[in-house]
């Protein structure tokens, strides 16, 4: 049998990969608290890197094309992370401000999350190009996509 020829380490790796693929993303967190911390950490990092670029777009900080591109690259990676940490059952488990609408209107929430990722992708492309006017326009798009979710899906108080 084919499997007899495989090294045990490869069989173990295959089993782990198979298990990961079989689980929904939310189940990759052991506890709801872990998912909540994960998405909150992602948003904190996104805010840090986005606001460095936004400060240049607003003329509060001198434009530095290399720094803008570096921050946009990091943002573009992190922006893809938080959605996976909004699985079923992660509304409670640690203090957080996620509104129940996230799970009630899950298709709309996914659309809003995808929109944000797309806008961040445009900012990354603009920052790589190094044109401040294009960066300003893309910063506007990202800011609107942040705000759309804050308005609809983020409560004022922690639950
Ligand atoms: C930021 C930041 C946000 C967004 C949002 C845009 O710099 O941290 O959450 O912009 O304020 O409306």
Image (spheres, helix red, strand yellow):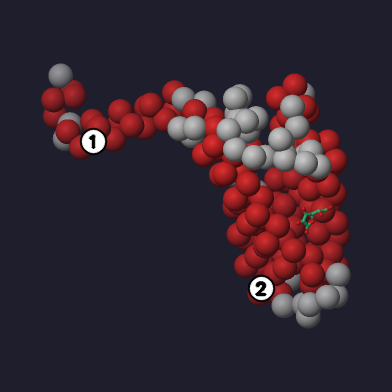
Crowding at label 1, few (<14), some or many (≥20) Cα neighbours within 10 Å?
few
For the question of whether residue 128 can be seen, the reply is no
Q: Is residue 96 above or below residue 19?
A: below
The quadrant where residue 20 appears: top left
The percent coordinates of residue 102 (x first, y second) are 73, 29
- Judged from the image, the secondary structure of the residue bearing numbered disc 1 is helix
- Per the image, the residue denoted by label 1 is 10
Quadrant for ligand 1 reads bottom right
Residue under the image location 54 percent in, 37 percent down: 33
Question: As rendered, which of 97 and 83 lies closer to the eye?
Answer: 97
The quadrant where residue 26 appears: top right
Residue under the image location 67 percent in, 62 percent down: 49
The quadrant where residue 46 appears: bottom right
- Judged from the image, the secondary structure of the residue bearing numbered disc 2 is helix
Residue under the image location 77 percent in, 27 percent down: 101
The percent coordinates of residue 91 (x first, y second) are 65, 30
**Figure quadrant of the N terminus:** top left
- First reached walking from the N terminus: tag 2 or tag 1: 1
User: Image check: 25 left or right of 57?
Assistant: left
- Per the image, the residue denoted by label 2 is 67
The percent coordinates of residue 130 (x first, y second) are 74, 71
Question: As rendered, which of 97 and 5 lies closer to the eye?
Answer: 97
Q: Is residue 50 above or below residue 141?
A: below
Residue under the image location 79 percent in, 52 percent down: 142
């Amino acid at each position: 049998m084919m499997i007899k020829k495989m090294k045990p380490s490869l069989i173990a790796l295959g089993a782990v990969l198979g298990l990961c693929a079989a689980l929904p993303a939310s189940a990759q967190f052991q506890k709801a608290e872990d998912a909540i911390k994960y998405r909150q950490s992602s948003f904190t990092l996104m805010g840090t890197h986005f606001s460095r670029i936004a400060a240049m777009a607003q003329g509060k900080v001198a434009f530095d094309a290399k720094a803008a591109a570096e921050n946009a690259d990091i943002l573009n990676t992190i922006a893809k992370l938080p959605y996976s940490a909004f699985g079923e059952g992660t509304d409670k488990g640690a203090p957080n401000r996620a509104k129940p609408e996230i799970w009630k209107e899950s298709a709309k929430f996914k659309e809003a999350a995808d929109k944000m990722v797309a806008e961040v992708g445009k900012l990354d492309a603009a920052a790589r190009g190094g044109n401040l006017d294009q960066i300003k326009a893309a910063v506007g798009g990202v800011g609107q996509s942040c705000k759309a979710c804050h308005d609809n899906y983020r409560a004022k108080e922690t639950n």
